[in-house]
Image (tube, helix red, strand yellow):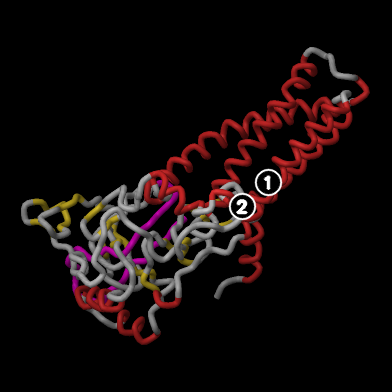
Amino acid sequence: MSNPVLNFCIRLMKWLPVVFITLIVLWSYYAYVVEMCVFAITSLPQKVVYLVLYHVFFLIFVWSYYQTIFAPVGKPAQEFYLSKADVDRLEHEDREDRQQQYLAQMAKDLPLVTRTIGGSIRYCEPCQLIKPDRCHHCSMCGTCVLKMDHHCPWVNNCVGYSNYKFFVLFLGYGLLYCIYVAGTSVEYFIKFWNKELDDTIGNGRFHILFLFFAAAMFSISLVSLFGYHLYLVFSNRTTLESFRTPMFRHGPDKDGFNLGSSNNLKEVFGEDRRLWFLPVFTSLGDGLKFPTRVQYDPSEPAPTDSPATESPDSPDSVGFGDGMSFPTRRTSEDSHQLLNDRQRWAEEGEGDVSDRETALTTVQPPGRSRMHVEAET
């Protein structure tokens, strides 16, 4: 039984990065508005211009940050969840091939084009559902997240289908905010070093000094992160997919969801260009299915619904039909609650992100079977 006090402390700790960022932003507001604009700047027109522009950047940045934090995590629709009878049937089946057949039968009417690296239906045991395309289980949030990109501690939320636009805008406006603050405070930073600032502002000089340093450092960090996510938007990939190529019916394809730069941009920001730069939800689709570069016939059975078999000529490859074979990366053995007491993984996590999906490609010793769970961290 879980300890409620411990769980409360863990939830509280998860908010510390958000509190840290909030305190930094509030301090920057005080340092810029009060210490620099009110006390350090002597020209009234300059004060007005600086303050008006500053509040435009500040408000749009805070709005985007708020939306990223508090946007509800996109969860799969009810049709992807297994009934209690289906779960019991799956758990009490000892044979791998029969378990795969059950999952394939349950998923035959669902809009799925991706599979595990072993060619199986992607199943999440904690949530007891068949995962939609691009959906992954987040161990931090304890749920499956539609089009999951990553779990971000700085917003204490998963970044995915429901808030990815907000996250990209948050990075972009955060970068603009830092560049504006650094650009307008550099003059007074130089005056500080030349001892030209009015002595009447007292310790306010140090606020301006650290304001410039903080804005410059955050600008350097944000420019690379923002640039990377723009690349992901225009190539229609998530952070997870950039580290591990999605597996489709015909095999792995890193550009499987790539529809061209223009269509990729619209998929995240929507059709109405007037709303692109506002942190309001305009992303296309429902997060459950996505257009692909290769068109699939829903009535055609997927070649990977059956267990992938190893090529006799290459024991380290897995076949996916059409005469194609792809190498697998084998890592340590592990165990879980379904499908195989000692199951050998056919894929491994990247860095601190682990997308370990059901792999049903090896023959296991007889015994109660187990099914693997995907866990994103």
Q: Residue 242: x and y, percent?
A: 37, 46
Q: Residue 93: x and y, percent?
A: 26, 81
180 versus 249 height, above or below = above
**Residues shaded magenta:** 351-377
Identify the residue at image location x=69%, y=48%.
62
User: Can residue 24 be seen at all in this image of the molecule?
Assistant: no
Crowd around label 1: few <14 · some 14–19 · many ≥20 (10 Å): some
Q: Are marks 1 and 2 in contact (CB under 8 Å)?
A: yes
Tell me, for residue 279, which label it has, or none.
Answer: 2
Tag 1's secondary structure?
A: helix
Identify the residue at image location x=85%, y=35%.
34
Mark 1 or 2, nearer chain start: 1
Query: Disc 1 designates what residue?
Result: 60
Identify the residue at image location x=43%, y=40%.
231
The answer to which image quadrant residue 217 occupies is top right
Identify the residue at image location x=54%, y=49%.
273
